[in-house]
Amino acid sequence: MGSFSVWHWLIVLLIVVLVFGTKKLKNIGSDLGGAVKGFKDGVRDGGSSSAAADESPAQVTAAKKVDGNTVDVEAKTKS
């Protein structure tokens, strides 16, 4: 009763294939593989660009949608 045998896992796999279909499972597998590859690339790029993190980022301004409840303020430092 502790662990499942190979036959139990084959039956579970068969039920999953019957429920989802092979095309859906293929799409899920390729999406998951792409996500893992993107994560690995991001970790690799993030570790090598530590010198770029020391620089101050450029300020990005964009057109903002203003409603009645929004207050736009600018923080300034004392000199």
Image (cartoon, rainbow, N blue to C red):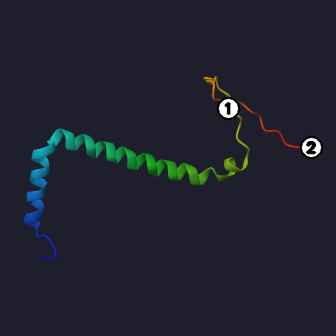
Judging depth in this view, the residue of 11 and 34 nearest the camera is 11
In this rendering, position of residue 79 left or right of residue 46: right
Asked where in the image residue 27 lies, by quadrant, the reply is: top left
Disc 1 marks a residue whose amino acid type is Val
What residue is drawn where x is 52% and y is 52%? 44
| Residue designated by label 2 | 79
Q: Tell me where residue 1 sits by quadrant.
A: bottom left
- Could you tell me which residue is drawn at 27 percent across and 46 percent down? 29
Residue 51: mark = none
Q: Measuring 89% from the left and 43% from the top, which residue is drawn there?
A: 78
Residue 60 or residue 69, whichever sits in front: 69
User: Nearer the viewer's eye, disc 1 or disc 2?
Assistant: 2
Apparent side of residue 44 relative to residue 19 in the rendered image (left or right): right
Mark 1 residue element:
loop
Above or below: residue 10 compared with residue 60: below
Pointer 2: residues within 10 angstroms few (<14), some, or many (20+)? few
Rendered location of residue 51, percent (x, y)? 69, 51
Quadrant in which the C terminus appears: top right
> Quick one: SS at disc 2?
loop
Image spot of residue 26 (x, y percent) = 22, 42
Residue at the farthest right position: 79
Question: Label 1 vs label 2: CA separation?
Answer: 24 Å
Identify the residue position indicated by label 1 in the image: 60
- The reply, left or right, for residue 8 in relation to residue 60 is left
Residue 61 or 31: which is nearer the viewer? 61
Identify the residue shown where x is 82% and y is 39%.
76
- Which is nearer the N-term, disc 1 or disc 2? 1
For badge 2, the amino acid type reads Ser
Does 37 sit left or right of 20 as displayed? Answer: right
Q: Residue furthest front?
A: 68
Q: Residues within 10 Å of mark 1 (few under 14, many from 20)?
A: few
Number of residue marks: 2
